[in-house]
Image (cartoon, rainbow, N blue to C red):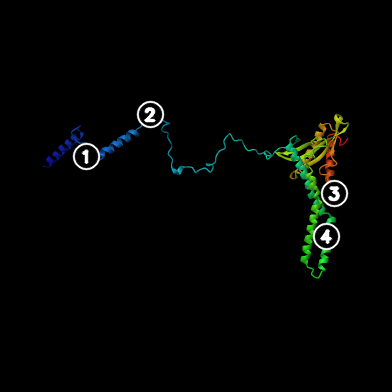
């Protein structure tokens, strides 16, 4: 009985296999399992797209080989990773500290704008003499002594009065001091008037000829100038000949003084006079800064400065073999 059952089971299995492998008579696996046919088609299409040929597998460029790495073997990021390297077209920085300093040039100018700038420099130098004269007047020993004497007399008079008080003395002293300062301002006001006289008319002689103007430029700024006039002696008309050069104005902008700019202007002036064939050069007796408003007692600083400038000009004239005066 058992054998019959096993025989029948074996025969049934063989028939089932024959039915499955049959071409049109047996049902397929996909017909028995719902959705299996769609999954099988998707897997077949994916396998065809991912299949590589032997040539593709042997190509180095299409499938480069990278050594296996892990996160534990990665090197730490470099601190210079974010830095940018300068391009080869960029030039190395210039270490010269004077690379961006403007040039300093001195020359004879024919420009009207530069001549006007030169006239302004001369006028400013004349106006600045007012401050020098005011200091000389205020701090002169005689002026200080006279002011102190007046204040002492006023204090003695006020304190001896029945209602005299220190506050009254202090107020009176302040008023006297203010009056003294206003007096100094009035006494030195002539330098402002002299500065206003430095204009285009002052630049021309009696016949309307303009003086020569030398300027020193620092970049685009005129920082110094010399007003030079050639004085002719001899016959009249065309028979006149140049005898000597006369400096009528010499000025340097305030913040550039004491740096050799004025000396360079005088050197250039002597060279111009020599090129023109003049016999000498000197400061004019009535040059722009020669005016004295206060009594000679308070002009010691001006006189010393004038003598120093004349002495320096004489040294330059002698150094170039040019006589000072005919």
Q: In which image quadrant can residue 142 be found?
A: bottom right
Residue marked by disc 1: 32
Q: CA distance from mark 1 to mark 3?
A: 131 Å
Q: Residue furthest left?
A: 1
Which of the two discs, 1 and 3, labels the residue nearer the N terminus?
Answer: 1
Q: Secondary structure at mark 3?
A: helix
30 or 275, nearer to the observer:
275
Question: Which tag is nearer the camera, tag 2 or tag 3?
Answer: 3
- Mark 4 vs 1: CB contact within 8 A: no
Question: Which tag is nearer the camera, tag 1 or tag 3?
Answer: 3
- Mark 1 vs 3: CB contact within 8 A: no
Category of crowding for the residue at label 4, using alpha-carbon neighbours closer than 10 angstroms: few (below 14), some (14–19), many (at least 20): few
Mark linked to residue 148: 4
Category of crowding for the residue at label 1, using alpha-carbon neighbours closer than 10 angstroms: few (below 14), some (14–19), many (at least 20): few
Mark linked to residue 300: 3
Which of the two discs, 2 and 3, labels the residue nearer the N terminus?
Answer: 2
Q: CA distance from mark 4 to mark 1?
A: 133 Å
Question: Which tag is nearer the camera, tag 2 or tag 4?
Answer: 4
């Amino acid at each position: 009985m058992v054998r019959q059952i096993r025989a029948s089971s074996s025969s049934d299995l063989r028939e089932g296999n024959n039915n499955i492998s049959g071409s049109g008579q047996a049902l397929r696996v996909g017909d028995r399992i719902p959705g299996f046919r769609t999954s099988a088609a998707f897997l077949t299409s994916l396998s065809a797209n991912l299949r590589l040929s032997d040539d593709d597998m042997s190509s180095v460029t299409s499938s480069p080989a990278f050594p296996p790495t892990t996160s534990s073997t990665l090197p730490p990021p470099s601190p210079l990773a974010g830095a940018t390297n300068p391009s080869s077209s960029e030039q190395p920085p210039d270490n010269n500290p004077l690379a961006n300093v403007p040039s300093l040039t001195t020359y004879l100018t024919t420009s009207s704008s530069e001549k006007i700038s030169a006239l302004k420099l001369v006028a400013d130098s004349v106006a600045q003499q007012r401050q020098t004269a005011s200091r000389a007047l205020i701090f002169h020993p005689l002026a200080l002594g006279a002011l102190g004497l007046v204040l002492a007399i006023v204090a003695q008079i006020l304190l001896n009065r029945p209602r005299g008080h220190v506050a009254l003395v202090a107020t009176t002293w302040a008023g006297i001091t203010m009056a003294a300062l206003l007096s100094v301002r009035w006494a030195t006001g002539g330098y402002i008037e002299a500065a206003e006289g430095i204009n285009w008319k002052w630049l021309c002689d009696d016949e309307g000829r303009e003086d020569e103007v030398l300027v020193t430029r620092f970049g685009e700024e005129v920082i110094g100038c010399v007003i030079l006039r050639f004085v002719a002696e001899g016959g009249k008309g065309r028979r006149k000949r140049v005898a000597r050069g006369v400096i009528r104005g010499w000025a340097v902008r305030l913040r550039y003084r004491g740096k050799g700019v004025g000396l360079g202007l005088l050197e250039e002036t002597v060279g111009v006079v020599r090129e023109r064939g003049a016999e000498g050069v000197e400061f004019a007796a009535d040059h722009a800064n020669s005016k004295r408003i206060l009594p000679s007692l308070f002009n010691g600083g001006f006189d010393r400065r004038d003598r120093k400038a004349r002495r320096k000009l004489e040294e330059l004239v002698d150094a170039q073999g040019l006589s000072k005066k005919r």
